[in-house]
Image (spheres, grey):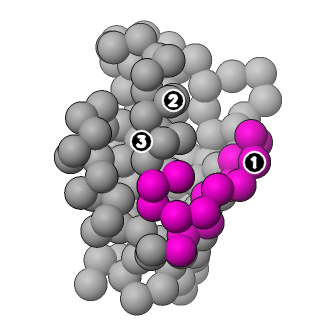
Amino acid sequence: MAGVDELLIRNLLEVFGERDGGRRRAVIAELYDQDVLFQDPEGAVHGRDAIDAKVAALLGDAPAGFVFHATDPVRVSGDLGVLTWAFGPADGAPVVSGTDIALTAGGRIVRLHTLLDGGA
């Protein structure tokens, strides 16, 4: 069973960073509970398909060379994890940064909240 730290890193790189829809959906099925709740500043969505749609829209609007990367190690307390990240050109300054907070159960993400940093 995957640890919270692994779930958050894979979520960042293999879900939110994956432009290939087929590969992304396979990882979503592996990492997320079927009834997962995802909330960001735009609102909340439920379920794997809704998360896939949000990620597809995000990446569809972003330039091809933009990537996500972790900015600090994952912090874990029991079934809760926190990961800070940045998104932007692979060889340049990020255009946005934020924090993911995940609650896990049974080796899957059941709740994921994304907070964006102001002014980044």
User: What's the mark number on residue 43?
Assistant: 1
Where is residue 118? Give x, y as percent.
Answer: 78, 29
Q: Residues within 10 Å of mark 2 (few under 14, many from 20)?
A: few
Identify the residue under disc 2.
Answer: 58
Q: Residue at x 22, y 44 (%)?
A: 22
Indicate the quadrant containing the N terminus: top left, top right, bottom left or bottom right.
Answer: bottom left
> In terms of depth relative to the viewer, which is nearer, 118 or 103?
103
Q: Nearer the viewer, mark 3 or mark 2?
A: 2
Q: Nearer the viewer, mark 1 or mark 3?
A: 1
Find the magenta span and give its range.
35-50
Q: Secondary structure beneath disc 2? A: helix
> Cβ–Cβ below 8 Å for labels 3 and 2?
yes
Magenta stretch, main secondary structure class: strand
The type of residue carrying mark 2 is: Leu
Q: Earlier in the sequence, mark 2 or mark 1?
A: 1
Q: Residues within 10 Å of mark 1 (few under 14, many from 20)?
A: few
Question: Relative to 33, does residue 88 appear above or below in the rendering?
Answer: above
Q: Secondary structure beneath disc 1? A: strand
Where is residue 69? Give x, y as percent.
Answer: 40, 36
Where is residue 57? Give x, y as percent.
Answer: 50, 30
Identify the residue under disc 3.
Answer: 16
Q: Residues within 10 Å of mark 3 (few under 14, many from 20)?
A: many
Question: Relative to 97, does residue 60 appear above or below in the rendering?
Answer: above
The type of residue carrying mark 1 is: Gly
Q: Residue at x 43, y 34 (%)?
A: 56
Question: Relative to 100, does residue 109 appear above or below in the rendering?
Answer: below
Using the numbered discs, state the Cα–Cα distance from disc 3 to disc 2 in whole angstroms: 8 Å
The answer to whether any part of residue 85 appears in the image is no
